[in-house]
Image (spheres, rainbow, N blue to C red):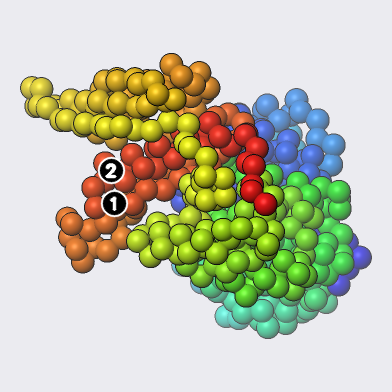
Amino acid sequence: MAASIEIYDTTLRDGTQGEGVTFSVADKLRIAERLDAFGVHYIEGGWPGSNPRDIEFFEQARHRTFRHARLAAFGSTRRKDLRVEQDDQVRLLLEAGTPVVTIFGKTWLLHVLEVLQTSPAENLAMIEDTVRHLKAHGRFVVYDAEHAFDGYKDDGEYARATWQAAVRGGADVLTLCDTNGGSLPAEILAITRDARTLFAGTLGIHTHDDIGLGVANALIALDGGATHIQGTINGYGERTGNCNLTSVMPILQFKCKVPSVPAESLDQLKELSQFCDETANLRPNPRLPWVGAASFSHKGGTHVNAVQKVIRSYEHIDPALVGNSRHVLISDLAGRSNIVMKARELGFDVTNATPHLRDMLARIKELEHQGFEFEAADGSLALLIRKVLTQSPPPFVVEGYHVSVRSNGGSSICEATVKVRVDGQFAHTVAEGDGPVNALDAALRAALVGFYRQIAEVRLTDYKVRIIDSRSATAAKTRVLIETSDGTGEWGTVGVNTNIVEASLQALVDSLEYALVRHRPAEVPV
């Protein structure tokens, strides 16, 4: 393996071909700046010949200064039977004004004959002509050999001829692409080694994750002589996605002991991952390796007990090295160690000798059996721990509520009435909403804001409903999970009932109660 590896990020181009991934020009500029600050070597900004948005991106990017990365415009070889100087798409690649131009060409005879519908000789000329033309205009050229592995397996001699055409044209980087994402590591290794014998320059690898081997295939290519990896943040990309750079970069640094991006950037990896998800308006995948919320989560009692004693017993690396953190999950699988570690994570000064620890565990297991789930409901769990440990009264009590729906000219109006008690004082409020739960939420907040002004800053950010046992049909229990924020933090709460409104009220009450007590110290009896 080489002494260092180049990282080529194509989040802004190949990543946007993934389902549900869309970036505005402003989004692309912000992500490009973050990628540059993180230290990637290349940022592929888009295809200026394909849409006005990418053309505008390159126009604006021309006025930005990139300290680490070189910006690349992406496109294809010239069209068949056309002089390269007359190809408008190639002209737009040059007009993008980027120091790097990446073009793809056909390796697989299937595509040459059936898709391009041209001759093998003309395809070779298209590759060589385009690379030479771009080099003549002073561009650093990355040649992406599309379907490199499928083409090689179909006709190795012709595949090699296409790569040699790019080399003759003067390509600076020859990238082998597993475009369909179906190759196995042994195939990647053998074919990459063969390509290495043809080209002394920088050899790259571009993989997809169609069979779950995108990262593995990129890494094995390094053993074959590749020194340049293309991929996307969070594995965005067409179908099941591209090689995930948020896995590749820490693997190189911490497992292979080979640098790629600056080592000091890696403790910001989770932040970069979440930034890209937020910009794309996607919910982060909790199960992503390294950066996912579940990457360093522990649930089984035996595991947690071991981690409590020796952290590395069930963790392959310190999560802080990639900006992540350890989480202990609470469920019916929990043991005393789970409760102690989770309670400490939530800010409670708890040890194995703390009174009522057994009662706390029994109560959690009982509620889990009823259908409650605390893995995503830290707020509800913290309230439960506080109540068992301190026996302190809640900051408010809902004395009663009523929800009604009435028809109004073909539409419905939902109204909720709530009565709350705070330190012997009462408030009785009415509110309308877009549905019974929204009306109930509005009425509850209106009743409490007179006692607690900070309630005005609390916002519900997500609301999920899950039927626990669908075999009970309309009598089934419903689990409601709510996420809430006050601008300085977020927390989850849960409610369970056969009545969806009652389950929602439980979760709402917990969300507001936790907002009021989460900064208060909990005095635990000795």
Locate residue 215, reporting x and y percent. 66, 67
Q: How many marks do you count on the picture?
A: 2
- Residue drawn at (55%, 64%), measured in percent from left and top? 358
Q: The N terminus lies in which quarter of the figure?
A: bottom right
Secondary element at tag 2: helix
Mark carried by residue 502: 2
Identify which amino acid the numbered label 1 is placed on.
Asn
Mark carried by residue 62: none
Residue 155 shows in this picture: no
**Neighbours of disc 1 within 10 Å: few (<14), some (14-19), many (20+):** many
Residue at the disc numbered 1: 497
Identify which amino acid the numbered label 2 is placed on.
Glu
Q: Is residue 518 above or below residue 499?
A: above
**Neighbours of disc 2 within 10 Å: few (<14), some (14-19), many (20+):** some
- Residue drawn at (21%, 66%), measured in percent from left and top? 471
Using the image as rendered, state which of residue 44 and residue 422 is in the foreground: 422
For marks 2 and 1, give the CA distance: 6 Å
- Residue drawn at (67%, 71%), measured in percent from left and top? 305
| Disc 2 and disc 1 in contact, CB within 8 angstroms | yes
Residue 395 is left or right of residue 301, and the answer is left
Locate residue 345, reporting x and y percent. 66, 51
Using the image as rendered, state which of residue 505 and residue 298 is in the foreground: 505
Locate residue 490, reporting x and y percent. 56, 39
- Residue drawn at (74%, 58%), measured in percent from left and top? 319
Residue 32 is left or right of residue 416, and the answer is right
Locate residue 21, reporting x and y percent. 51, 45
Secondary element at tag 1: strand
Using the image as rendered, state which of residue 169 and residue 179 is in the foreground: 179
Residue 453 is left or right of residue 41, and the answer is left
